[in-house]
Amino acid sequence: MLLVTIGVSLVLRTILNDQVQLQWWGLLVASVIALLFTFPISIITATMNQTPGLNMITEYLMGIVRPGKPLTNVCFKTYGYISMGQAVSFLSDFKLGHYMKIPPRSMFLFQDLAGPKTMFGSLGNYSALNWFFLGAMIPPATTLNYNAWLVIGVIFNYYVFRYRKQWWQKYNYILSAAMDAGVAIIGVIVYFTLSNNGINLTWWGEYCDLASCRTAKGIVVDSCPVHY
């Protein structure tokens, strides 16, 4: 299976060279990284329930080797980081199967059959489910965060993408990285200047006095509306 998947990846890399922009040696190096890190990361996951990712390592490595090539960087990250993550998830299912006395060969077979079925099923239902899965990885946050995410996303991934395509292709990836870096930097600043000194801020529009009011009928609470 390892040889088949690497072979298919090499073929796709050759056919879609303009879109992938990842050299054959980059694909092999990413595969080796995923293979080498699967075992130690799996041990950490099994003992500590924490799964360190290789996203930063793969991004940094390819960024040094091929600077200024964002598509190459993302593809290298996918084959290096995502492959390892999928392998760890695969092994976690095997661990569950071991506890449930499921034969390893049966677990392996059904895991392999579920992959293509899930992939083709997702492709067939993509038009109907793409908005549903869009929010799958959104972290818990306040309405202020969601509103900012929605506004920025619509502006740059719809209007700018549609009407200023050249700007979007040249600068949107850099803008996204700048926003991520800005969040990290301001997080450190806020911690050392405010949180570390016991200073808490109540942001405008983030909290509502009526948020704690009951919505059930007939409940009477001071300063809250009564629903009948």
Image (tube, rainbow, N blue to C red):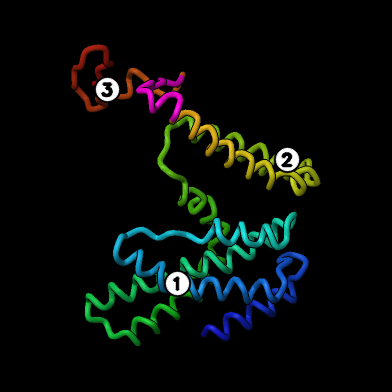
Query: Of discs 3 and 2, which sits in the foreground?
Result: 2
**Left or right, 96 with reference to 61:** left
Residue 197's place in the image compared with 54, above or below, is above
Query: Which residue matches tag 3?
Result: 213
Q: What residue sits 47% from the left and 50% below the top? A: 137
Q: Mark 1 or mark 2: which comes first in sequence?
A: 1
Q: Which residues are magenta?
A: 192-203
Residue type highlighted by circle 1: Thr
Q: Secondary structure at mark 1?
A: helix
Q: What residue sits 28% from the left and 72% below the top? A: 96
Q: Position of residue 198 (x, y in %)?
A: 35, 23
Q: What is the crowding at mark 2: few (fewer than 14 residues within 10 Å), some, or many (at least 20)?
A: some
Label count reads 3
Residue 193's place in the image compared with 86, above or below, is above
Could you say which quadrant of the image residue 161 lies in?
top right
Q: What residue sits 22% from the left and 75% below the top? A: 99
Confirm or deny contact between disc 3 and disc 2 (CB under 8 A).
no
Which mark, by number, is residue 38? Answer: 1
Question: Residue 201 lies in magenta, yes or no?
Answer: yes
Residue 41's place in the image compared with 32, above or below, is above
Which mark, by number, is residue 160? Answer: 2
Q: What is the crowding at mark 3: few (fewer than 14 residues within 10 Å), some, or many (at least 20)?
A: some
Relative to the observer, which residue lies in front, 26 or 85?
26
Q: What is the crowding at mark 1: few (fewer than 14 residues within 10 Å), some, or many (at least 20)?
A: some
Q: Mark 3 or mark 2: which comes first in sequence?
A: 2
